Amino acid sequence: MGTRADQARRQVAAAREALAGEVAGMERSLRDAVDLPARARRDPVRFAGLAAGAAFVAVGGPRRVLRRVGTVLRGGRPPAPRSLLPEEIERAVEDLGPDAGAVRARLEHEFAAYLDANRQDRARTDATRTLLRAFDTIVGTVSKRAARVLTERLFAAGTERRDR
């Protein structure tokens, strides 16, 4: 009976030593992962690249770049001017005095004619806008995943594992 107990004690002691070794290894890995200055000294180019990539993705860089490329491909159309708001137009028409009704009717008529003339262009623009929104959603999702991966790599423990 004594030999079995001694053997069990030796197994427990060996398991404790193995566990202590694993805990020490995990502590070293954690310290390596958190010690960013040491990682930067060890491999400065990779560290800087990962940090720059994570920052670029975190501030929405891919989305901005793709929007800019889309603007250039579409011909770089400037945004519509927003200098006159509908209330301001209404006030300007009211200031015309007795001709206000005729001017308002003329504006409404010309706007309706413009909408009819450009209906096909608007439909094409709406389809493009829908496609670009879907693309933007996909890019946003991919960018978030890329930011997560870059951050994980940035804070990952060193690839070289030291046992002692």
Image: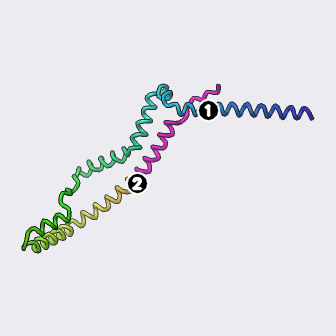
Numbered badge on residue 27: 1
Q: How far apart are marks 1 and 2 (CA)?
A: 40 Å
Q: Which amino acid does label 2 sit on?
A: Thr
Residue at screen point 79% across, 34% down: 12
Quarter of the figure with residue 130 = bottom left
Q: Mark 2 points at which residue?
A: 137
Q: Is residue 2 left or right of residue 17?
A: right
Q: Is residue 63 left or right of residue 19?
A: left
Residue at screen point 46% across, 32% down: 47
Q: Which amino acid does label 1 sit on?
A: Glu
What range of the chain is rendered magenta? 140-164
Residue 144: say if magenta.
yes
Q: Is mark 1 on a helix, strand or loop?
A: helix
Dot 2 alpha-carbon crowd within 10 angstroms: few under 14, some 14 to 19, many 20 or more = few
Give the x, y percent position of residue 90: 16, 67
Give the x, y percent position of residue 60: 38, 46
